[in-house]
Image: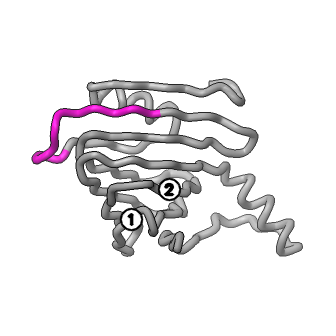
Amino acid sequence: MADGDADILESRDLDETSTFLHQNSGPYKYELQEHTNLFVARLEFKKLQDMTVSYGWFGSAITVSLKPDAPYYSLFSRLYGSSEYTVGNRVFITSPSCGAFLPGTVPLRVRTQDRWQLFGTNFLPSAIQRELSHLLGSDIVRPIEFNPVVNFD
């Protein structure tokens, strides 16, 4: 995907969707939950200078997992639906008033409900480190760990 171009997928196939998501957001693992409806998803990614913004709508409950091999930073919010996030040892529920900022340095597991919508922003680690170094007036060389719970109220 070139800078500024949108990459869009509508699919009823989990394998096709997983491949698309892997190409656009990283090596997450996606599995349907047993009780879920038939799989359906609509996804859109748009790459900007130091970040990628995304939108996703899923009709099915899925489990998402990742054991990161390199730092990454992602902010997720939603208009409706909820998910249970396990980030390292921290467990919390996201909703329209509570989002997730993934620090990208610890294992992640997300269990969603059926019919959920997600807005995401993925930041390049170098952009986060550069901006924080500038703000603090000191070079940041280690991965930065954030509290994953974001209160939008």
- Residue 17: within the magenta? no
Residue type of the residue flagged with mark 1:
Thr
Q: Mark 1, residues whose alpha carbon is within 10 Å: few (<14), some, or many (≥20)? A: many
Residue at screen point 27% across, 40% down: 59
* Numbered range of the magenta stretch: 33-43
**Residue 14 located left or right of residue 133:** left
Q: For residue 71, say whether it is visible.
A: no
**Residue 7: x %, y % from top left:** 55, 26
Residue named by callout 1 = 94
Sequence-wise, the earlier of marks 1 and 2 is: 2
Residue at screen point 43% across, 62% down: 96
Helix, strand or loop status at disc 1: strand
Residue type of the residue flagged with mark 2:
Phe
Is the residue under label 2 in contact with that under label 1 (CB below 8 Å)? yes
Residue furthest to the left in view is 35
Residue named by callout 2 = 76
Q: For residue 80, say whether it is visible.
A: yes
The majority secondary structure of the magenta stretch comes to loop
Residue at screen point 47% across, 53% down: 68
